[in-house]
Image: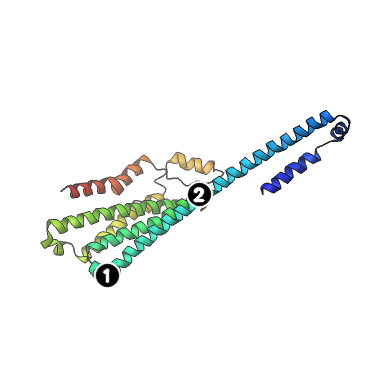
């Protein structure tokens, strides 16, 4: 590519030499030397600009490729690691305890974060714009909120299960049965879906001004950003983060 650019520059300069310059070169050696110096100086400047532009483009492409490789490796390790956790709990009899059901649910939530959220976020980050459509943007945002909420609620359930097991081990078998664990996990995922897919599918999470702006003035390159109303942001953050965080801190402090 660089050699072609040099040839184009030289061809362009050769074509723009007019008859006056040729006549001057034959009649005045000093002037011909000046014209030659100006010619090669111009060629050198254009060549330097072309080299700098090609170098910058190569560096940008290399940085993007390295970033894509790192994100792909991170996503692969996250998915593979959580799959191994689920397989270990399912295949090993010693790990088929009731408390590990919450751990398996946590692994599934984290696996979905890596596969269904981080994958599209990585593509969006590498390209610089959203290519999957406006409708799928809402689905992706809802999936992000649901999986993150389920992950945090599963952590809260794990801490509560360990607290009961340590505080009163004799009654643990009567209080925490397999049925209770399954119902608790189902309620965790149901609550995570209710605070994510329901309001987002109804458009309750997005401010009216933002919706009108997107509808009337669509951007040249579409974007997918999480813009929330204050009410939804407060309610969602309290259920998804603050309340579980307070419960976990209080349990581990005791």
| Mark 2: secondary structure | helix
- Residue in the foreground of this view, choosing between 242 and 107: 107
Image coordinates of residue 65 in percent, x first then y, are: 52, 51
Q: Which residue is mark 1?
A: 92
Image coordinates of residue 204 in percent, x first then y, are: 39, 46
Tell me the residue at 32%/67% (across/down): 87
| Crowding at mark 2 (Cα within 10 Å: few <14, some 14-19, many 20+) | some
Question: Left of 229 or right of it: where is 3?
Answer: right
| Mark 1: secondary structure | loop
Residue 204 position (above or below residue 34): below
Quadrant assignment, res 34:
top right
Quadrant assignment, res 82:
bottom left
The image's mark for residue 126 is 2
| Numbered disc total | 2
Tell me the residue at 74%/36% (across/down): 40
Tell me the residue at 73%/42% (across/down): 9
Image coordinates of residue 230 in percent, x first then y, are: 36, 40
């Amino acid at each position: 590519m660089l050699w072609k650019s040099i040839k184009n520059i030289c061809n362009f300069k050769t074509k723009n030499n007019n008859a006056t310059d040729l006549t001057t070169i034959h009649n005045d050696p000093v002037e011909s030397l000046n014209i030659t110096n100006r010619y090669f100086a111009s060629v050198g400047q254009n060549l330097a600009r072309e080299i700098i532009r090609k170098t910058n483009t190569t560096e940008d492409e290399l940085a993007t490729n390295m970033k894509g490789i790192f994100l792909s490796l991170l996503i692969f390790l996250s998915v593979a690691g959580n799959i191994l956790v689920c397989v270990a709990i399912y295949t090993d009899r010693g790990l088929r305890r009731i408390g590990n059901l919450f751990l398996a649910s946590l692994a599934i939530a984290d696996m979905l974060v890596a596969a269904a959220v981080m994958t599209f976020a990585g593509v969006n980050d590498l390209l610089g714009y959203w290519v999957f459509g406006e409708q799928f943007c809402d689905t992706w945002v809802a999936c992000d909120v649901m999986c993150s909420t389920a992950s945090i609620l599963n952590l809260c359930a794990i801490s509560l299960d360990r607290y009961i097991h340590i505080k009163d081990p004799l009654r643990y078998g009567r209080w925490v049965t397999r049925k209770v664990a399954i119902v608790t996990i189902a309620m965790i995922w149901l609550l995570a879906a209710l605070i994510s897919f329901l309001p987002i599918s109804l458009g309750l999470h997005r401010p009216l001004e933002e919706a009108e702006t997107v509808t009337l003035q669509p951007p040249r390159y579409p974007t997918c950003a999480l813009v929330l109303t204050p009410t939804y942001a407060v309610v969602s953050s309290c259920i998804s983060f603050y309340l579980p965080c307070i419960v976990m801190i209080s349990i581990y402090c005791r």
